[in-house]
Image (cartoon, grey):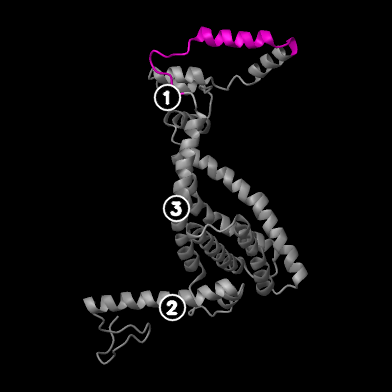
Amino acid sequence: MQFESSFQFCPYCGQKSNDELTIGLLFYNTISNYFSFDARFFKSFFPLIFRPGYLANRFIAGKRLMYLHPAQLYLFISVVFFFLLSFTIVRKQVEDFDITLKKTFDKPLIIEGNQVEVSQVWDSIQYELNSANNQAKDSLLISERNNSNIFDLNKIDSLISLNSSDAHIIKEMGVDDDTNMLTIKFYTQLLKLYKERNGGQLLQAFYDTIPISLFILLPIFAFILKLLFYKRGRYAHHLVFSFYFFSFLFTVFSIILLLNEFIDIPDWLDFLIAISTFFYLLVAIKRFYKHDWLLSLFKTGVTTVFYLLFVIPIAIVIMSGVSLLFY
């Protein structure tokens, strides 16, 4: 759009009419944007920690330029948290889980010259059966018939030592032509885990699903608040509150990680710090939703119990399944 040559700025957006990009201008804008973010972060950080519910109230009231956007604040703090988590806990747990899984499979894969003879296995089974009473034998036979899909590790080891194809091995594990694709994928991944004994990769895959899953868990938390406070604004208002609360949670957990990395604080102190997040939520709900203390305590308790006992366990099961299927 053309304006008169005397116009130094656009009358609609305020941008300079002749704003040529130079190295100096690029450097200035970069520094300006950085310090603008930095200033707004610190203006947001201290109220986030020490004034529960304050930032959410200010954002809903339209006072938004002084503080970081709730989603931006959440994203920044969560990135810091997962960075710290990966370097303080995840790496060690992945290594420990790898070792533990290999110890669990205490019997090595069968190699040539050391195969388990089928007759020896059968003789051992016969001996155990003969030493038991008739009732025990009947129970064992019934159990075997009802669990015919449980695969024999000795047989799997033999097939692996013979370099059988994965398709052939999973058929011996109980997969047939009528098995659905999801089950086939599940058995394929189990076989991969058994052959490679790389439990660390599986645990790493689980941790990798956490950031993505939180983009679903956070809106669910906001939806619970919407159900409990259905007369207190739109869903977007509850989402803003949730962004700030989860930002606080990640901040607290980041502090715990840092403290334990350098000081190794007692477990009871870790527990107290974690419990303090409940009281933070209580105060934040009291101030944001303008309820009395008793009703705020009740709804905070309902939110916490439902989220921790139902939403989180279901999410962990789903995340575990996804991790196994795609690690």
Is residue 11 toward the left or the right of residue 93 in the image?
left
Horizontal side of residue 213 vs 128, given as left or right: left
In the picture, measured across the screen, residue 92 lies left or right of residue 32, that is right
Which residue is denoted by mark 2 in the rendering? Answer: 39
Q: Amino acid at mark 1?
A: Asp
Q: Quadrant of residue 327?
A: top left
- When the figure is inspected, residue 114 is found, relative to residue 246, above or below; the finding is above
Disc 3, SS: helix
x 36%, y 84%: residue? 14
Any magenta on residue 130? yes
Q: Residues within 10 Å of mark 3 (few under 14, many from 20)?
A: some
Q: In screen coordinates, is 112 left or right of 73?
A: left
**Label 2 – label 3 distance at C-alpha:** 28 Å
Judging by the rendered image, the residue that carries numbered circle 1 is 166
Q: Quadrant of residue 237?
A: bottom right
Magenta segment: 108-135
For label 1, the crowd category at 10 Å Cα-Cα, with few meaning under 14, some 14 to 19 and many 20 or more, is some
Mark 2 vs mark 1, foreground winner is: 2
> Label 3, on which residue?
86
Alpha carbon of mark 1 to alpha carbon of mark 3: how far? 33 Å
Q: Position of residue 239 (x, y in %)?
A: 58, 65
